[in-house]
Amino acid sequence: MELKRMQFTGSVWRPPYEANSLLLQATIGCSHHRCKFCSLYKDTRFRVASREEIEKNLEIAQLYQPKARRVFLTGANPFVLSFEKLKILATLIKIYLPEVQNIGCFARISDIKQKTREQLMELRQLGYDRISIGTESGDDITLSQMNKGYSVMDIVEQCRKLENAGIEYNFTYLIGLAGKGQGERNAINTADTFSLLHPYIINVLSLTVFPDTVLYEEIGTGTFVEASEYERIEEMEMFIERFQPSNCVHLLANTVSNPIPFIGVLPKERERILKEIQSIKNNFREEDLRDYRKRIKSL
């Protein structure tokens, strides 16, 4: 039998915790594409996958993974699709893969803002859950400097809408994003912001700046100065100490951007995680950690 391959355009990214999900292209590129640090989509122009493309991929998925239980939509932020398009997409997935129970994707805060609470509730009934949001920070200065396009108030308001609709969500926290000498402020404000909400997972990454980004140019001109590796470790330590979740939150720091990976559950494993971080500080030199980051070619 001829091997059939699902079609994807450009680079495909998914969080580590979506490793077992069926990937389905819903959008290509990023609808925002203005974050200073981002190198993921480069020159890929944003567009929405056509119904024909989606159905062709679903036909192939039906052949190889007919019993898939979870689908993760690829693209920088498929949740930007209108309520009606997300409904149609969920219906198509159910036609081809009837055992699918839930659908995840990346989302921007602005994508949630476009949808009413009632629409979000209906999307939850259709299977949308565990949405991954690239918050990066909970500090207004950092969000503004990095051109994220929304504020801390927006994060709180829109994530509460998700909670009211019964949709679980995950956050990304990008340590080092505030720059040299600003990690303490970023950690405190991000911990305080996240403590107001109920993320299921917080995916911690460490800023890695690549060429062809605005931030790389700003480093070259001295407009932005990178935080040292030790500063980043101390920022993460401060965040963990200050963050006060009212539910169990899975803390993941296990991507290639993290020189020393770890995972844990807050608040119950707070002390263990802090001991691991102290061990990192005691056993690794700044130079070793910096050399590791220089060798990272892609995320």
Image (spheres, grey):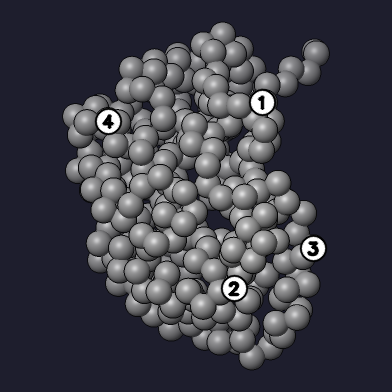
Q: CA distance from mark 2 to mark 4?
A: 37 Å
Q: Nearer the viewer, mark 1 or mark 3?
A: 3
User: Image quarter for residue 296?
Assistant: bottom right
Q: Nearer the viewer, mark 1 or mark 2?
A: 2
Mark 3 Cα shell of 10 Å, populated few (<14), some (14-19), many (≥20): few
Quadrant location, the N terminus: top right
Q: Which mark is residue 115?
A: 4
Q: Amino acid at mark 3?
A: Arg
Give the residue displayed 48% in from the left and 74% down from the top: 183
Give the residue displayed 40% in from the left and 45% down from the top: 149
Q: Which mark is residue 227?
A: 2
- Do we see residue 271 in this rendering? yes
Q: Earlier in the sequence, mark 4 or mark 3?
A: 4
Q: Is residue 152 left or right of residue 102?
A: left
Query: At numbered mark 2, what does the secondary structure look like: helix, strand or loop?
Result: loop
Query: Would you place residue 251 above or below residue 281 in this image?
Result: above
Q: CA distance from mark 1 to mark 3?
A: 27 Å
Q: Amino acid at mark 1?
A: Phe
Residue named by callout 1: 8
Q: Amino acid at mark 4?
A: Lys
Q: Nearer the viewer, residue 153 or 244?
A: 153
Query: At numbered mark 3, what does the secondary structure look like: helix, strand or loop?
Result: loop
Q: Is residue 230 left or right of residue 129?
A: right
Query: Would you place residue 16 above or below residue 270 in this image?
Result: above
